[in-house]
Image: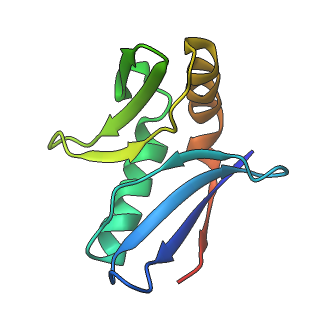
Amino acid sequence: MAIFQVFKSSTKNQYYYLLKATGNSQLILSCEEFSTKQNCLAGIQFVKKNAANDDSFERHDSYLSFTFVIKNDNQQTIAKSENYTTEPPREQIIDLIKKDAGSAIIQDLT
């Protein structure tokens, strides 16, 4: 299971979300900043709607750096992964997102 947490920066007046695993609170996915809460929630809805589609994940590979991003229909990055030093952990996180993001609840921390 996973949970989206929405929060507002106290210094930048921007909105952000994190996708975390329930239970151990492992960070699964983070996002770019959004100027409004409505845009932040729209980013979450896009991830929830498209997470099961492998084409939603744009993978980036380089030496000891395996990451991915999720882009919206306008090709704006709306979510990004942590950096992984090997490919298998990245793919495990993508599989977890595919499985759990669609049903993840949203926790508003603003």
From the viewer's perspective, is residue 110 above or below residue 62? Answer: below
From the viewer's perspective, is residue 63 above or below residue 37? Answer: above
Residue 2 at what x, y percent from top left? 69, 48
Quadrant of the rendered image containing residue 42: bottom left
Q: Is residue 53 left or right of residue 77?
A: right
Residue 53 at what x, y percent from top left? 43, 25
Relative to the observer, which residue lies in front, 107 or 16? 16
Quarter of the image for the N terminus: give it.
Answer: top right
Q: Is residue 18 left or right of residue 40?
A: right
Residue 36 at what x, y percent from top left? 29, 77
Figure label count: 0
From the viewer's perspective, is residue 93 above or below residue 38? Answer: above
From the viewer's perspective, is residue 85 above or below residue 41? Answer: above
Of all residues, the one furthest to the left in this rendering is 74
Q: Is residue 10 left or right of residue 3?
A: left
Of all residues, the one furthest to the front in this rendering is 63
* Residue at 62 percent of width and 13 percent of height: 88
Residue 22 at what x, y percent from top left? 78, 52
Q: Is residue 84 left or right of residue 65?
A: right
Quadrant of the rendered image containing residue 99: top right
Colour pattern = rainbow
* Residue at 50 percent of width and 28 percent of height: 52
Of all residues, the one furthest to the right in this rendering is 23
Relative to the observer, which residue lies in front, 57 or 41? 57
* Residue at 85 percent of width and 51 percent of height: 23
* Residue at 20 percent of width and 41 percent of height: 73
Relative to the observer, which residue lies in front, 72 or 63? 63
